[in-house]
Image (cartoon, helix red, strand yellow):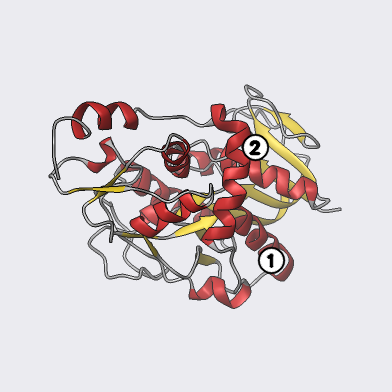
């Protein structure tokens, strides 16, 4: 039985990763401060990755799945505490690519500050660099927007709430802005392929090969609940994050490297049905934002489109 160390393990991606590999029969260790409920079946290593005091020095892991590395110190402080391991997989982000870059972004594309993501992206760049300096054969995965069960970010859940309340949906402009998604189960399955096959390419953009307009994405969210959206197009120059889940930033990744080892990804339709099933039973686990309040106070009453 392979041993996996998962950093985090209690929130969205890291929680799903822990659950996935427990269900797949792996021996899963999670490293966290034990401030939230643990996934059943994991073995807890209670501690802060910045102050481990040698607790990992005598332990062996087949794989370190680093889901919670957000800056270079996160990498430096963990790697120096690790004893023995065979593979290291870090989840990075598409935020490492600047918004002005040529798209689709390739793994070799320029990496620098993205004005929408700011320090989140530059810190991920620094984390990648720190990791490769210390673990030269590490794998680095750069996903677009992740979604699926356990997502505590108010993205698809916001649209589900609109559909459940039979509200009009306030759509930025004509809704043609395109986004790229990746279901968290696909992320886990890809990680498992990397663990087993040890592919030669170590830095991979990951995600669905196709992009989707925000209008089509909202429509698919509604359809997962058997409903049809009634759109109101918002053309006023206002910050769309006040009433919508995403920045006014269209981008997509070239995922050719991923497709060589993991060619089939879950369709958005299937993924959203999976997600809404979870959400209907766990809506209180999502960190909701006051989009409804903003819409009701600033869009629904005062302005016409």
Report whether residue 80 is seen.
no
Mark 1 residue element? helix
The residue positioned 55% from the left and 31% from the top of the image is: 283
Is 97 drawn above or below residue 297 in the view shown? below
Query: On the image, which quarter does residue 254 sit in?
Result: bottom left
Q: Nearer the viewer, residue 184 or 121?
A: 184
Compared with 75, 93 (above or below) is below
Q: Which mark is residue 9?
A: 2
Work out whether residue 275 can be spotted: yes
Residue 247's x, y, as percent?
Answer: 29, 47
- Figure check: 97 above or below 167: below
Q: Which residue is mark 1?
A: 193
Name the element at disc 2. loop
| CB contact under 8 Å: marks 1 and 2 | no
Q: Quadrant of residue 174?
A: bottom left
- The residue under the point 77% across, 43% down is 28
Residue 246 x/y as whole percent? 33, 46
Distance from Cα at disc 1 to Cα at disc 2: 20 Å
Residue 288: name its quadrant: top left
Q: What residue is rendered at 34% in x and 27% in y?
A: 290
Task: Mark 1 or mark 2: name the one nearer the start of the chain.
Answer: 2
Q: Which mark is residue 119?
A: none
The answer to which of 253 and 264 lies nearer the viewer is: 264
> Residue 72 in the image: x percent, y percent?
45, 44
Q: Position of residue 214 (x, y in %)?
A: 35, 56
Q: How many marks?
A: 2
The residue nearer to you, when weighing 33 against 87, is: 33
Quarter of the image that includes the C terminus: top left
Of 23 and 237, nearer the camera is 237
């Amino acid at each position: 039985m392979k041993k996996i160390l998962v950093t985090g393990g209690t929130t969205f991606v890291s929680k799903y990763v822990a659950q996935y590999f427990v269900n797949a029969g792996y021996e899963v260790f999670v490293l966290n401060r034990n401030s939230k409920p643990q996934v059943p079946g994991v073995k807890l290593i209670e501690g802060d990755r910045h102050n481990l005091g040698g607790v990992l020095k005598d332990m062996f892991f087949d794989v370190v799945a680093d889901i919670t590395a957000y800056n270079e110190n996160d990498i430096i402080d963990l790697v120096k505490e690790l004893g023995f391991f065979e593979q290291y997989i870090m989840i990075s982000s598409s935020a490492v690519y600047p918004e002005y870059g040529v798209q689709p972004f390739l793994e070799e594309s320029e990496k620098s500050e993205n004005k929408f993501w700011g320090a989140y992206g530059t810190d991920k760049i620094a984390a990648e660099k720190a990791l490769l300096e210390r673990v030269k054969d590490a794998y680095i995965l750069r996903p677009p927007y992740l979604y699926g069960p356990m997502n505590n970010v108010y993205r698809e859940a916001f649209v589900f709430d609109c559909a459940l309340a039979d509200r009009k949906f306030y759509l930025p402009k004509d809704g043609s802005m395109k986004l790229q998604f990746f279901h968290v189960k696909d992320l886990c399955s890809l990680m498992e392929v990397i663990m087993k096959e040890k592919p030669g390419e170590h830095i991979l953009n990951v995600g669905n090969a196709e992009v989707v307009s925000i209008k089509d994405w909202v429509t698919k969210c509604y359809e997962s609940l058997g409903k049809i959206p009634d759109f109101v197009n918002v053309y006023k120059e206002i910050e769309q994050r006040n009433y919508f889940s995403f920045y006014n930033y269209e981008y997509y990744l070239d995922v050719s490297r991923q497709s060589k080892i993991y060619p089939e990804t879950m369709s958005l339709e299937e993924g959203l049905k999976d997600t809404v099933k979870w959400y209907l039973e766990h809506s209180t686990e999502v960190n909701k934002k006051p989009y409804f309040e903003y819409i009701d106070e600033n869009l629904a009453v005062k302005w016409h489109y």
